[in-house]
Amino acid sequence: MAIDFASQADLVRQLSSIIPEFASEWAEWHDGESPLSSNPHVVYMALMPLLGRVELSDKQCKALAELINGAVAAGGMAENAVFTCFLEHFRNVPVHKRVKPYLRNDAKLRLSANFTP
């Protein structure tokens, strides 16, 4: 089954399959309420704090990179969401160093575009 990178529900399912802790993070993010928005931006905003607290296996790092690569390649809202709500802040979490080698060049360029030494 193909993932719709602009679909909030698809992203939540995919991220929960990659990082099982995300399912509870997502539930807490919404505190049992309906999502504030049905766009993918909110999903990446909920993911970021979790990435600062969990250790990911190499398999999880590779799967997360594949998801990021897919969102960038999809363009439109999917690309905008992964760029503005994820890649812009990804360097702030240590796991980015383990995920970065699996990113395609277009995703790495977006990651680097936001880095100012």
Image: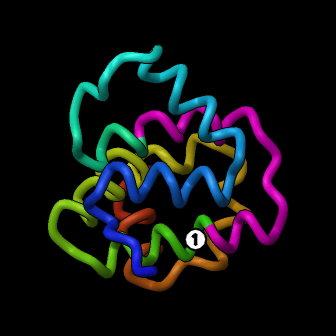
Using the image as rendered, state which of residue 2 and residue 64 is in the foreground: 2
Residue drawn at (52%, 26%) of the image:
27
Please say whether residue 111 is visible from this viewpoint. yes
Q: Is residue 103 toward the left or the right of residue 98 in the image?
A: left
Q: Is residue 55 rendered magenta in the image?
A: yes
Q: Position of residue 67 (x, y in %)?
A: 50, 70
* In the image, residue 61 above or below residue 85: below
Please tell me whether residue 56 belongs to the stretch shown in magenta: yes
Q: Say left or right for 59 vs 41.
A: right
Picture layout, residue 98 above or below residue 39? below
Which segment is the magenta one? Answer: 45-63
Name the residue rendered at 59%, 30% in the picture: 25
What main secondary structure does the magenta stretch of the protein show?
Answer: helix
- Residue 115 visible? The answer is no
Which quadrant of the figure has residue 1? bottom left
- Packing grade of label 1 (10 A; few <14, some 14-19, many >=20) is many
Residue found 47% across the figure and 68% down from its top? 68
Q: Is residue 83 left or right of residue 50?
A: left
Q: Which quarter of the picture shows residue 4?
A: bottom left
